[in-house]
Image (cartoon, helix red, strand yellow):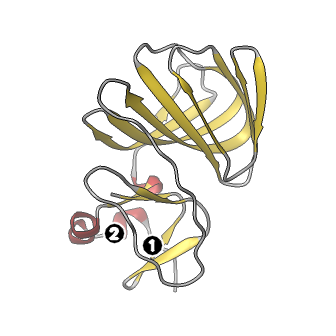
Amino acid sequence: MTPLAPSALSTHLRERWNVIPAASVQPQLWPDGLGLTRVLARHLGWRLSVTEIDGRIAFPAVREIDRLLMVGGTQPLALQIEGGMIHLLPGQAVSFAGEDRVIAIAEHAEVVYVSTQRSLARARLSISTHDGPFQVPAGEDGFSMLLAGDAQLGAHTLQAPTAFL
């Protein structure tokens, strides 16, 4: 079966399952040209995006926001947070305050990025792997992400990264 082209995912299927392939979202180029962001969902108090980082990038400080990053794809990500270095491999995550001084260093890293407004929401992360059928455990207050490989949804093949809301 061939992978599902973003434009081929019917409106009905998107509405019924709240499936958002990152490839179906228009990327926003960062002002410095070293990153692309695709915002997959915005809700009261939180935002979910997939970001591609290529180079050395300083995160802007944002008050009252907490950030959770998880490395997807195949490339690692190094983060300098308040002067300390953290090296993340695909599937690893870190959280930090929006006020923290953060520099990301990567070559073509793909990152799932959740930002939450501190007074309204908190991000939690649970990672699991599946080989075979599974249920997407998402509801009004959460989401699931396909980070690697592909998944069958009916007759459609969805490729990572894809959000299930």
Q: Distance between the residues labelled 1 and 2?
A: 7 Å
Q: Say whether residue 18 is left or right of residue 67.
A: left
The residue drawn where x is 22% and y is 69% is 16
Amino acid bearing label 2: Leu
Amino acid bearing label 1: Leu
The residue drawn where x is 52% and y is 57% is 161
Q: Which of marks 1 and 2 is nearer the N terminus?
A: 1
The secondary structure type at the circle numbered 2 is: loop
Question: Which mark, residue 58?
Answer: none
Q: Name the residue under label 1.
A: 4
Q: Say which of 121 and 87 sits in front.
A: 121
Specify few, some or many for label 1: CA neighbours under 10 Å numbering under 14, 14-19, or 20 or more: some
Q: Are marks 1 and 2 in contact (CB under 8 Å)?
A: yes
Which of the 4 image quadrants contains residue 12?
bottom left
Asked if residue 54 is positioned above or below residue 164 in the image, the reply reads above
Q: Say whether residue 120 is left or right of residue 107.
A: left
The residue drawn where x is 24% and y is 35% is 44
**Where residue 109 sits in the image (x, y, percent)?**
68, 43
Specify few, some or many for label 2: CA neighbours under 10 Å numbering under 14, 14-19, or 20 or more: some
Q: Quick one: quadrant of the C terminus? A: bottom left
**Where residue 126 sits in the image (x, y, percent)?**
53, 55
Asked if residue 154 is positioned above or below residue 165 in the image, the reply reads below
Q: Name the residue under label 2.
A: 9
**Where residue 18 sits in the image (x, y, percent)?**
29, 61
User: How many numbered tags mark residues here?
Assistant: 2
**Where residue 163 sits in the image (x, y, percent)?**
42, 57
Q: Say which of 138 and 75 sits in front.
A: 138
